[in-house]
Amino acid sequence: MSTVVGSLSTKDNVKFNPQVREEKLGTTIKDREEEKIIEEDEENKLKGEREIMDLGPLFSLKEQLEKDKDDESLRKWKEQLLGSVDLSAIGESKEAEVKILSLTIQCPGRQDLVLPLPFTKTSKTSSCLFALKEGSRYRLLFSFVVAGNIVSGLKYTNTVWKTGVRVDYSKKMLGTFSPQKEPYVYEMEEETTPSGMFARGSYSARTKFVDDDGKCYLDVSYHFEIQKKWPTTPSTSS
């Protein structure tokens, strides 16, 4: 597998604020409306940037290399990005395709929790996808495959709510990736789950993967829990 760690990336985080008291519950509707406005603003911004840039017609990888053969610096950059890609096996696709394969949660001293996509519930009676212990360190890893063409500016966003109030928002620019058969594995920075009485309980989350052109490759919602202790039976996606 190819591993990509932090190249061409930036991160914009609003840290966990799990101490949501009852008096804040009245802000739920307002918070949802603000979230919708933020998403609409980002979509409009992307749309405006695309119109200003006027990217023109799309080209397959073969067409791009042929078109840029006289521009030595651009040609070398694309060759470096493509590496050992077998152009004969890619075809003539003019659009990139990205398939997010799995999300893995790593916690020191614990077995990796691999969640294949699409997500499945941990049991027939619970909507909880997984549970983590309060105050525990964890790291997220994404596995994905790129096919057809180069994907530019692949971005990950994640929003978390508790009792309807947004408590966390993360945005990470993952980078630009060339098509290849082997999956990429992107490793996020280590973080710590919140702790305390107000931190425990059920959370809802929404995760999206979008590129520079605004094309969405994954938009998934799920629930998880923060508990006082680790679950007696490890959470699995089976």
Image (cartoon, rainbow, N blue to C red):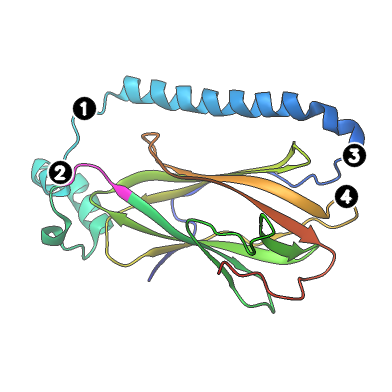
Residue stretch rendered in magenta on the structure: 93-97
Q: Is residue 13 left or right of residue 17?
A: left
Which amino acid type is marked by label 1?
A: Gly
Q: How far apart in space, not on screen, are marks 1 and 2 (Cα)?
A: 13 Å
Q: Which mark is residue 198?
A: 4
For mark 2, what is the residue?
64
* Marks 1 and 2, the one that precedes in the sequence: 1
Q: Which mark is residue 121?
A: none
x%, y% of residue 182?
32, 67
x%, y% of residue 44?
46, 22
**Front one among 125 and 228:** 125
For mark 1, what is the residue?
56
Which amino acid type is marked by label 4?
A: Phe
Cβ atoms under marks 1 and 4 closer than 8 Å: no
Quadrant (top left, top right, bottom left, bottom right) of the N terminus: bottom left
**Front one among 175 and 139:** 139
Residue at image point 74% right, 57% down: 225
* Marks 4 and 3, the one that precedes in the sequence: 3
* Marks 1 and 4, the one that precedes in the sequence: 1
Q: How far apart in space, not on screen, are marks 3 and 1 (Cα)?
A: 51 Å
Which amino acid type is marked by label 3?
A: Arg
User: How packed is label 1: few (under 14 Cα within 10 Å), some, or many (20 or more)?
Assistant: few
Q: Secondary structure at mark 4?
A: loop
Please say if 178 is above or below 112.
above
